[in-house]
Amino acid sequence: MIKFVLRGISVLTSLAVAMTVALFLQFVRTGRIGALLSIGVFGVLTLAGWILTVLVGPFAALQLWRLRPSGRRATAFLAACATIYYALGLLFYRGPGTKVAVVVFMVTCSAATLAFLLSGPARVLCHEASPHPVNGA
């Protein structure tokens, strides 16, 4: 079951990369990158998140699919960044048209993914922890 969930997270990470590339290309094609950056800190954070997703995401997804420790860590890093991004957006950068329920859902999903990736069972399956810790160690 843990392997199935990790592989599902890997597939979702791959989809996030593909969707981010498509969104970025749409912004470039329509000339809206300047408008994104002109909205201030949140626009810069958005662009930085896109770049991070495109640079780290493929490695994270592939290595997580292979159940490698580096994939678990890289995907956890992306999930942590997403959690922080959506939480900051909800708390400080909420615009008039913000769909709060969607943002809360994204914070919850990102945080749950992060918690799962940091869990003992995920660490064991990715060969980073002993399945039976030694007492006193």
Image (spheres, rainbow, N blue to C red):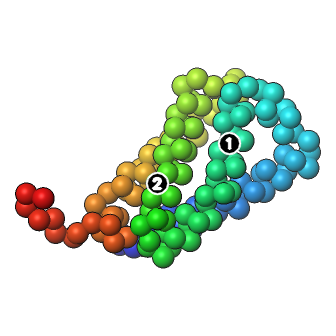
- Along the horizontal axis of the image, is 47 left or right of 118? right
Q: At numbered mark 1, what does the secondary structure look like: helix, strand or loop?
A: helix
Where is residue 26 shown, x and y percent of the image?
A: 85, 50
Q: Nearer the viewer, residue 48 or 97?
A: 48
**Labels 1 and 2: the sequence-earlier one:** 1
Where is residue 64 shown, x and y percent of the image?
A: 49, 69
Point out the image quarter for the N terminus: bottom left
Q: Residue at x 68, y 27 (%)?
A: 41
Badge 2: residue crowd in 10 Å (few <14, some 14–19, many ≥20): many
Point out the image quarter for the C terminus: bottom left
Where is residue 68 shown, x and y percent of the image?
A: 44, 71
- Where, by quadrant of the figure, is residue 99 drawn? top right
Q: At numbered mark 2, what does the secondary structure look like: helix, strand or loop?
A: helix
Residue 7 seen in the figure = no
Q: CA distance from mark 1 to mark 2?
A: 17 Å
- Along the horizontal axis of the image, is 8 left or right of 2? right
The vertical placement of 98 against 69, above or below, is: above
The three-letter amino acid code for the residue at tag 1 is: Ala
Q: Residue 122 has which mark?
A: none
Q: Residue 48 has which mark?
A: 1
Q: Nearer the viewer, residue 98 or 74?
A: 74
Q: Residue furthest toward the right? A: 30
Badge 1: residue crowd in 10 Å (few <14, some 14–19, many ≥20): few
The three-letter amino acid code for the residue at tag 2 is: Ala
Residue that badge 2 annotates: 76
Q: Nearer the viewer, residue 108 or 72?
A: 72
